[in-house]
Structure formats: structure tokens, C-alpha cells
Image: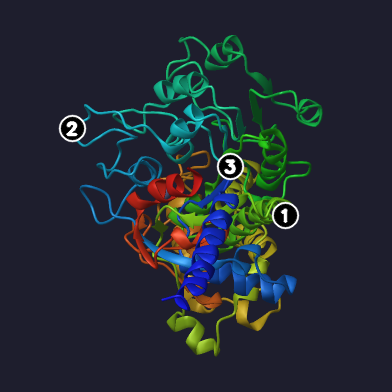
Amino acid sequence: MKKLTPILLFLFTILFACNNTTEAKKVKNIILLIGDGMSVNQIYATELYSNIIHNKGLAMNNMAVKSFMTTHSANNYTTCSSAAITAMACGYKTNNGVLCKDTSLTIQYETIAEKLKRKGYRIGIISSVYLNHATPAGFYAHQNSRKYYYEIGKELPASKFNYFGGGGIRYPRGNTGDSANIFDQAKATGYKISKTHSEFNSITKADTMLISINPEVYRYGDFYWSIDKRKGALSLADFTKQALNQLNNENGFFLMVEGGKIDWACHKNDAASCIHEMLDFDKAVGEAITFYNQYPDETIVIVLGDHETGGMSLGTNENVLLGNIQLQLLENQKISTQEFDRLLQNVVSEYKQPTFNQVMDSVSKYFGFNNGNNTLTLNTDETEWLNEAFQTQVLKGLIATDYDYLFTNNKSFTARVIHILNQKAGIGWTTNDHTPMPIPVRVTGIGHEYFKPYIDNTELAGIIEQILY
Ligand SMILES: [Zn+2]
């Protein structure tokens, strides 16, 4: 027994030391990055593309996959973004379409961001789509429907979160434009609002209540497409960097960054636009990792999706004929489907009755078809298929441009152009909607061990609470 005593003392010392270490390494800063619609194949396609075209991988691929996460909602194997974010941010399943309320629409759930706000953390919310869209809204709003944009928007300043950045607010004066302006409400609550480049550049650390909106957005407040490379447009990474600077303080912070248009591109089954949105999102991940490297003992970075969109896959019958996956072909696409539709509209209005060849000149210019690359030379069947859509859609002026992102027409001229390019590159799609595929969860930082190999989306908020308290 006497001999055992020193050994026991030694073991107690180690145990005590371990406990102390755990105490000392509690996480203060949590950065959650959500690729909307992003699962394994969106990531792998982007990784391959980046390796081929840019000769480098992704920042997120340096992070360990700690879990796979299920995504089903209360009433469907396939979730929508509002039910997904309710599960992730609040810890409860709800029905598709509902935002941070229960299935009977009687209980409002407190979100993880609201809980942390109560505890003294600074809170930041960033998205590349409008800030009252489902995913960013899922951290501050509670509504029977994700479509109640104005009601959701009114909850934004009421949250008193410290930083909102990226996209604008859809319908700030309500659907009919005659309600009280949400931006006025925000100013009255104490928010500084930045909407120009000079305002963006003049933000200081003292601006602790800030709504920082990208000057370069579509009319509802979503970013222009990354693939279109608008000159001077601010990126998701720019806002992530700004937010990290604003939020960093001795009491800690929670920052959520959403790459929202990954999902929108996948709804369109547009692989090249998806990959460009993914690359943009990955740069925001890079900013988070840079911050982590400065504060490795206080910070955790979590990268995941909310659901998969499109049933995206790699490997098509067409690409088997061509001998291999050829993702480099996607580099030929220089334009988003939305902007190509606008270009088609302009061609129609310029030429009144354009010929098929005049339209195909634009197809060659922006997608690389029939430009001397044998792989991208269209055969007779493909040409006839496009000509059919030209006759039935383009010539009749039936081209939609600023449509809702959920509007899809797979028979449209542009959808067919995209389909042919994707097939040759080796990208397939099963749907224009979401799928129930599980999502990889990447984690770097203190507290990563709290992530089990397989989790449900309702477990995420609880894991974050365990790490932070
Ligand atoms: Zn979606």
C-alpha cells in the first residue's frame, strides 16, 4: 500500500493537470461557416477543379472531417433551408418552411446565437444572399413561414446582434413597399449602416452595432454571381475579415458565415457557377483559418452544409465516352445562367429576329462550344436539341432573367447549354431541388473532440454549447 501511494499521487497529479488543461482551453470564439446546399460532391468537384485550374486545393480540405450529419426535417426526408437551420441553430426538428418555431407553430425556439448574446458574446451574421433569407434568419428570427421576409427583417435589428454583413434586406418596406423601413428601425436601434465602398472602408472597431451591406448586389440583396467577376465587388471573404475584426473581444464571439448561392447554382444544375461560389466560400473559410492561427487556443472553426442541393454527382455516360472526367472544360463557362439569359434577351431585342447562328456565336463565346476544341464541338443531336429550344423559347421572347432562384425550366435554351457542358465535364444532377444526402462536418480547433462521427443536425447547437460553457 505504501508503495502504491506515490503512484496514486502521481496519477491524481496527471488527472488534475489534465482537468486544468481542459479548463484553460475552453473555446471563446466560434466561427460557423455554412455552404448552403453543400455536400461531398460540391466540395470534391471544387477541389478537383481548383487542383486542375489553380494548382492548389481548398482551405477547407485542410480541416478534418469529424462527423457526417443527417439533415431530414420533421415532415420530410428532404429538408428545406429553414427547417435545416432551425434544427442546427435551435436543436429541434420542424416542418419545411417553418423558421425557428415548432411544428404546431406555437413555440418559438431560442437560437444558439440568441443564447450566446444573452451570455455576453458578440454575435455576427454574414450571408451572400439577403440577410432575411432562411439561413441567416435562422439565427435571429422566428416565423411561421420563411417567406415572411418583412416580418423576418423586422426581427433583425430587434436581435441587437453586433454585426450583420454581406447581402441586403429583401422587401425592407414590406411586400407592397408602404410599410415602415427596416433600415430606419435599425438606425433607431443604434445600428450604423454601411452601403457603399467608402463606408465599408471607413468602418472602425468602435462600430459595434453594424449592418454592412455589399454595394454590388441584385435588387433583392443577393451578391452578384462569383463567376461573373463584377469589378470591385466585395466578396464573402471581405465581409468575413471585417466581421472577425469587429467581433474579436475579450468576452468571445459567435460568427456565422453563409455561402448562400452555392444552393442557388445547384438549383439551376449549373456546375461552373456552383464551383465559383464554392471557391468564394472557401476563401471565407481561409479567413476563418487565418484568425484561428492567430488565436489557436481560443477558437473553433466549423465548416458544413445545411443540406445537399441538386443530387450533384461526378461521372456521366458522356464523359465515359470522352475517356475521363474533364472538369477543366468548365473553365470555358464565363457567365452565370442568369446573366446569360439577360444576354440572350439583349440579343433578341437587338436583332429582333436573331438567327440560330447569331445566338450560337454567344454560346461559343461564353461556353467554348464550336471553338476548335474537339471535345466541345457540338454534334448534330446536340445542335438540334439547342435549335429546338431556340425556336420554342428564344425566338418567342420567353426568356426569364431576374426570376426567383427556385424557378427552373430545364427545357430552356440556357439550361440545355449548361446540361451539355456539364455532361461532357462529367457532372450529373438528379433534381432541381434538395436531396436528403448527409453532410460532412469539418472542424478545426479546441473542442473538436465533441463531434461524434455521425450526428443529427439537431445536435449541432448542443455541441457548441458544450464547447463554450
Ligand atoms: Zn435551396
State which mark lies toward you, 2 or 3. Answer: 2
* Residues at marks 1 and 2 touching, judged by CB atoms closer than 8 Å: no
Q: Quadrant of residue 248?
A: top right
Do callouts 1 and 3 mark residues in contact (Cβ within 8 Å)? no
Q: Residue 128, which numbered label?
A: 3
> Which comes before the other along the chain, label 2 or label 3?
2
Residue 274 screen position, x and y as percent: 55, 58
Instruction: Answer whether residue 307 is visible to the viewer in this image.
Output: yes
Give the quarter of the figure containing the N terminus. Answer: bottom left
Q: Amino acid at mark 2?
A: Ser
Q: Amino acid at mark 1?
A: Thr
List x then y, in percent, for residue 383: 51, 71
Q: Earlier in the sequence, mark 1 or mark 3?
A: 3
Dot 1: element: helix
Front: mark 1 or 3: 1
Q: CA distance from mark 1 to mark 2?
A: 43 Å
> Which residue is farthest front?
2
What residue is pinned by disc 2?
A: 104
Determine whether label 2 and label 3 are within 8 Å by CB. no
Of helix, strand and loop, which one carries label 3?
A: loop
* Position of residue 373 in the picture relative to residue 313 (left or right): right
Q: Is residue 368 visible?
A: no
Packing grade of label 2 (10 A; few <14, some 14-19, many >=20) is few
* Secondary structure type for disc 2: loop
